[in-house]
Image (tube, grey):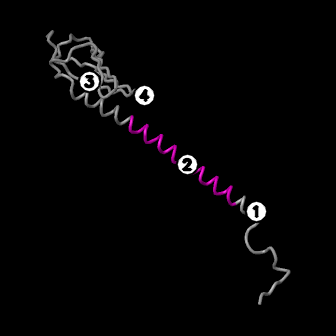
Amino acid sequence: MSHLNPHNEGTHGFTLIEALIALSIVTMVLASIGALIATNARATQSIEAHLTRLETARAIMTALPDRADLARGELSGETDGHPWRVDVSPLPTRTTGTSNTTAWRPMAVVVTVRSRSGGAIQLNTVRLQRNDSR
């Protein structure tokens, strides 16, 4: 036998308004999680592209000729779809009023690697070259 109590009618379950509010909260949470995942994916791609350019620059730097064969000027090329450029020039030094009788001349070496998207990385170093004008 069923007991019907007129005071308890309509108190079981959810109303349409409560269901819509719960659904909107779930939608906002899922949208926030989706935005976070998209941001992380873009950051990961950016870091991977940066590391690829850095490794390409390091490979070019290690493949440079010995200091005896390093010539002034510009070298350029492309490796794995990354255009690169190496600039070699004498490093400006301060003179102290004495004649330049040192055995070594510092050369500035700048390696620049670009990506297809336009990002670039630049490595700067100094190589000593024997001064033949002694």
Q: Secondary structure at mark 2?
A: helix
- Pointer 2 with pointer 1, Cβ within 8 A: no
**Tag 3 secondary structure:** strand
Q: Residue at x 74, y 63 (%)?
A: 18
Question: Residue under circle 3?
Answer: 126
User: How many numbered marks have been drawn onto this rendered protein structure?
Assistant: 4
Q: Is residue 29 magenta?
A: yes
- Residue at mark 4 to residue at mark 1: CA–CA distance: 52 Å
Among the two numbered marks 2 and 4 on one chain, the one whose residue lies closer to the N terminus: 2
Please give the name of the residue rendered at 25% of the width and 18% of the height, measured from the top-left corner.
Answer: 107
User: Of circles 2 and 1, which is in front?
Assistant: 1
Q: Which callout, 4 or 1, points at the residue further toward the start of the chain?
A: 1
Circle on res. 119: 4
Q: Nearer the viewer, mark 2 or mark 4?
A: 2
Q: Which residue is mark 1?
A: 16
Q: From the image, state whether disc 3 or disc 4 is nearer to you.
A: 4
Across and down, in percent, residue 8 comes to 81, 79
Q: CA distance from mark 2 to mark 1?
A: 27 Å
- The magenta region covers 22-49
Determine the image quadrant of residue 47: top left
Distance from label 3 to label 4 (Cα)?
24 Å
Amino acid beneath label 4: Gly
Among the two numbered marks 3 and 4 on one chain, the one whose residue lies closer to the N terminus: 4
Q: Give how far across and how far down residue 33 sits, in percent.
A: 56, 51
Mark 3 is on which residue type?
Val
- Dot 1 surroundings within 10 Å: few (below 14), some, or many (20 or more)? few
Residue type, label 1: Leu
The answer to which of marks 3 and 2 sits earlier in the sequence is 2
Residue 117 vs residue 22, the one in the foreground: 22
